[in-house]
Image (tube, helix red, strand yellow):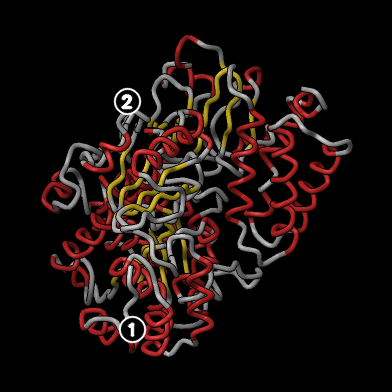
Amino acid sequence: MAERATPPASMQDYLAAHAHRGQTMLLPALLEAQKRYNHISKEIAAEIGRALNVPLAEVTGVIEFYSMLHDRPTGETHIRICESPVCNLFGAKTVSKTLCRELDTAICEPTIDSKYYVESVECLGLCERAPVMLVDDRPIGQTTPDVVAELVRRPPDPPSGLIRTGTRLLTARLGKISPTSLPDYEETDGLRGLEAALALSPMEVIEQVKAAGLMGRGGAAFPTGIKWEGAAQAEGQPKYLVCNADESEPGTFKDRTLLEEDPFSILEGMLIAAYAIGATQGFLYVRGEYPRAQGILQRAIEVFRSAGLLGANIRGRGFDFDIELRSGAGAYICGEETALFESIEGKRGYPRIKPPFPTQHGLFGKPTVINNVETFANVPLLFRMGVEEYRKLGSEKSSGPRLFCLSGDTFMPGLFEITTPITLRDLIFKEAGGIRNGRKLGAVLLGGAAGKFVPPDQLDVRLTFEDTRAAGLSLGSGVVMVFDETRDLRQVLLDLGHFFAHESCGKCYPCQLGTQRQLEILERLAHGQLLPGDKERLTDVGWTMTDASLCGLGQTAATAVLSVMEHWPHLFEPGQ
C-alpha cells in the first residue's frame, strides 16, 4: 500500500480543527490517521506532530506504545483474533490457523494485495462468546474453523450481551430499550436519580454516597464517597471527571454490555458525580477494541447534549458540564488510572508514582475523580432508590448490586447481577447451571488475570468484598472464569504469562523483566521442560514483582501463578 507524502484535505481539515488543543489530541489524531490509511507513515506522523506542536520523537514513541497503531502498511480488512485464556479453551489458535490458510496470509503479514491483515490479540472483551474476533469494527463471536473465512467475508450482526439473571436493577434496561432513545430511558426511570441529586447541595450528594457505602467496582474497592469528597475539597480549577471504560482484563465484559445497551445510565451517573465535585469537563475513555460501544456512546452523548443535559446551565441549576469520548488504542496498562490520564494527555500510558493522588493532582495536574463504568451505573440507582433501600442490597460492607462475568466451561456463560450475597459455588452451580458436558469442576479463576485460582473444595466463600478479603481472595473486576477437570492449568498459566509480558509498559524493571522471566519459565512448564530450580525461580520472580513493581499490573502479574503453586504444587514438579 503506497504511502502518502501529505494527508489529504480531509485529514488536514481534521488537524486544523483540533490543532489549538495541542498534545491532548495526539492519540485521537493518530487513530484517525490509522483509520484512514490502515497505518501511520513517517510523513503523516510528522504532519500530525507539526500540527499539534509535538516533537516527532514523541509522536513515534506514542505510535510504538499502543498495539492498535501501526507504522507499516497492513491491509484493507483488519482482523483481530482473540487468544485470551477463554478463547484458547475453545480453539482460538485453530481458528487463527484456519483463517490464515484460507485467506492465504500469515499472522501480522499483509497479503500481496493488502486485502487482509490478521493479528492475534490478548483480549477482545467478548469472553462469554468465545472464541471471538474483530473484523475491522465488527465483533464476531463463537467462531469455528469451518465457517471462520465466511464470517470474515460476510460478517453477521454484532452479538448482544448475554444477561443471565433474575433480579435486574443495574441491568434492568439491557435488551429491553433502544440504547440511544431518551424517551425509552425516561420511561424506565431514567433521569430520576439526577433529579433527586440536583435537589440536594453538592456536599449533600457526597454525604449520601458515603452513607450508602458505595464501593468502587473497578477492582480496588475504594469508597466512592471518600474519593468524591477529596476532589470536592481540593484546591485548583478546573476539576475533571473521568469514566474508566478501558475494560481490558481477560474474562471481563460487564462494562461493554452496559455501555452498548444502557449508555444513558453511565452518563447520568457522571452528571451526578460532576455536580457533586464541581467538575466542568468529563472524559469517557473506552478501550479501542470496543468500536460498537464507542459508536453508541457518541450518539448517546449527542442526544444528552441536544436535550440540554450536557453543556451550560444544566436543568437550570447553573451547573455546566460536558463529556468528551476518548478511545484507547490497545494498552491494558491504561486501565490504571494515572496511565489513563497520561493517555488522554497525548503521551505513552505510563503509570505515575503516587502520591500525589488523582483527587489532588490528576488529569492535566488538576483535581480529578475517576471511577469505572459499573460504579457510575450504580449512582443513579442509588439516588433513585434512596440510601436506606440501596443499603438493603448486597451486604453490610458491600452494599448495592454487583455484576459478575462468567465464562469458560460453565453451562451458561454471561453477565450475572447479584443483589443478595451468594457463594461462588451457588453462582456457578445454581445460577449458571454448573459445568458443561457433564464434567466436573477443575478450578475457578476469580477476579481476572490479576486474580487467584480457587480449587473445587473452597467455593463456599460469599461473593462480597469483606468475605473474599478474609479468604485471601479478591472480587477484582468481577471475573469468574471456570475450568473443567480436563483443562491443563499449565497451559492456562502460559496464556496469562503471555498476557502480562505483552502488556507490561516497561517503566519499572521488576515488572518489565519479571514478566519476561515468568513467561520463560511458564513456557518450559507448559512443555514439560522444567529445569532444576525453576519452581524456586518462579516463586522468587513472582514475589519480587509483587513487592517492587510500580503499579498494579506488576504487583498482580504473578498472583494467579502463585495461587496455582499453592493449591496444585504437583504441577510444578519435573516430569508432571
Separation (CA) of disc 1 from disc 2: 57 Å
Along the viewing direction, whichever of 89 and 341 lies nearer the viewer = 89
Residue at (24% x, 81% y) in the render: 8
**Residue 170, picture quadrant:** top left
Along the viewing direction, whichever of 50 and 236 lies nearer the viewer = 50
| Residue at which label 1 appears | 5
- Residue 183 picture location, percent across and down: 11, 51
- Residue 308 picture location, percent across and down: 16, 68
Label 2 sits on a secondary structure element that is loop
Label 1 sits on a secondary structure element that is loop
- Residue 435 picture location, percent across and down: 48, 16
Q: Which mark is nearer the camera, 1 or 2?
A: 1
Kindly tell me whether residue 272 is visible in this rendering: yes
Image quarter (top left, top right, bottom left or bottom right) of the C terminus:
top right
| Residue at which label 2 appears | 166
Please say if the residues under marks 1 and 2 sit with CB atoms less than 8 Å apart: no
